[in-house]
Image (spheres, rainbow, N blue to C red):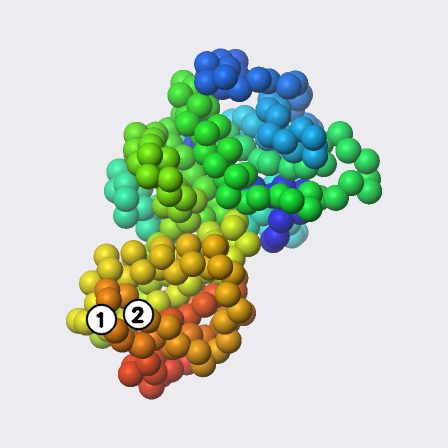
């Protein structure tokens, strides 16, 4: 999938008892103006009962928050047996970068909120928050304005999450594009800390995951940088030489560097490794990573371990 009908999308998982009135009230308490309400479409996959909130109306930018009283369709349908769900997924209705089994991967890698693994599995519905620029526009209207800003978009959706998250029946936040799970308290804490220090709240939008590649080599990657129009990053390292927490911080810093500088990397170049050790890490620019979801990645690993890394990743997917 890619950005098209919708430029961004996040979700709130519910117990199935959330109501449109409750969601509207929560939004209005936080100062959001409801532009209009939309009746549910024939097929829930394309839209349940919804409200529309203005984002950038001068370029037809609006957020649509719809309520679905059934579990998140994590398999994303099937082209023969679940045609409607599969079609909605292929058009980006579950998120422009959502990929099958993303919720289960989020649960498996909910390192910042262990309780979320059971809470998310118990959900029975969801509130979908989608951002688009073609609401009420003509057929020739651009899907994205020339000056669209993905960071500003995600900041706006995060404010909607904080507001709508107060509605009765909401269990937690789920970003299907970055495969992130957070409870309201954890989401609010990260948001406040980042706002007070003027930082981009990457942990709310993108996840960092850890895998065992071999007995000695670990794989850590980001998922969700596509929301920011940047590549995700894979780091492969010896687990007896690097602390995962240091590599986690390193991946966040490299992500921010990509976001702010947008460098043109080529395979074979090198960059400094994590932890201020002065080690040189090799860069590989790849069309696919080792772990789903499929996307372009920047693979990084210590130059001195190039042979071991090449052997470990040959024909492998975690």
Q: Residue at x 52, y 49 (%)?
A: 227
Picture coordinates of residue 57 (x, y %)?
67, 28
10 Å crowding of disc 1: few (<14), some (14-19), many (20+): few
How many discs appear? 2
In-front residue for pair 297/118: 297
Name the residue at 20% across, 63% down: 243
Q: Is residue 181 left or right of residue 151?
A: left
Q: Are marks 2 and 1 in contact (CB under 8 Å)?
A: yes
Disc 2 residue crowd, few under 14, some 14–19, many 20+, Cα 10 Å: some
Res 293 visible = no
For the residues marked 2 and 1, what is the alpha-carbon distance in whole angstroms? 7 Å
Question: Which type of secondary structure does the marked residue at label 1 adopt?
Answer: loop
**Looking at this rendering, what residue extends furthest in the bottom direction?**
307
x and y percent of residue 290 in the render?
Answer: 43, 68
Q: Which residue is mark 1?
A: 277
Is 212 in front, or is 147? 147
Image coords of residue 271 (percent x, y): 37, 73
Spot the residue most to the left.
240
**Left or right of 247: which side holds 260?**
right
- Residue 264 percent across, percent down from the top left: 53, 69
- Residue at horizontal 29%, vertical 56%? 249
From this view, report whether residue 293 is shown above or below residue 171.
Answer: below
Q: Secondary structure at mark 2?
A: loop
Up/down of 200 relative to 165, above or below: below
Q: Nearer the viewer, residue 286 or 125?
A: 286
Residue 273, disc = 2
Residue at 39%, 77% in the rendered image: 270
Name the quadrant of the C terminus: bottom left
Q: Is residue 233 visible?
A: yes
């Amino acid at each position: 999938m890619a950005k098209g009908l919708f430029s961004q999308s996040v979700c709130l998982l519910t117990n199935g008892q959330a109501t449109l009135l409750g969601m509207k009230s929560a939004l209005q308490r936080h100062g959001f103006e409801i532009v209009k309400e939309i009746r549910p479409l024939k097929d829930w996959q394309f839209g349940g009962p919804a409200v529309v909130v203005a984002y950038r109306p001068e370029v037809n930018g609006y957020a649509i928050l719809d309520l679905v009283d059934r579990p998140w369709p994590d398999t994303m349908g099937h082209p023969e047996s679940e045609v409607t769900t599969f079609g909605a997924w292929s058009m980006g209705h579950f998120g422009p970068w959502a990929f099958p089994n993303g919720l289960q991967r989020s649960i498996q890698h909910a390192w910042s909120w262990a309780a979320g693994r059971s809470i998310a599995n118990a959900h029975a519905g969801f509130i979908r928050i989608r951002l688009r620029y073609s609401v009420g526009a003509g057929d020739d209207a651009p899907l994205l304005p020339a000056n669209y800003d993905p960071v500003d978009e995600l900041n706006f959706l995060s404010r909607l999450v904080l507001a709508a998250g107060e509605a009765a029946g909401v269990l937690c936040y789920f970003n299907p594009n970055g495969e992130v799970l957070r409870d309201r308290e954890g989401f609010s804490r990260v948001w406040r800390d980042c706002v007070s220090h003027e930082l981009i709240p990457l942990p709310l939008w993108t996840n960092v995951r850890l895998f065992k590649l071999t007995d000695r080599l670990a794989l850590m990657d980001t998922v969700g940088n596509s929301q920011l129009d940047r590549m995700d990053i894979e780091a492969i390292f010896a687990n007896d030489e690097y602390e995962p927490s240091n590599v986690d911080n390193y991946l966040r810093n490299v992500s921010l560097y990509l976001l702010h500088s947008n460098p043109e990397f080529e395979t074979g170049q090198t960059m400094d490794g994590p932890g201020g050790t002065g080690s040189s890490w090799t860069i590989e620019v790849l069309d696919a990573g080792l772990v789903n979801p499929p996307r372009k990645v920047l693979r990084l690993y210590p130059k001195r371990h190039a042979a071991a890394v090449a052997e470990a990743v040959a024909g492998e997917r975690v």
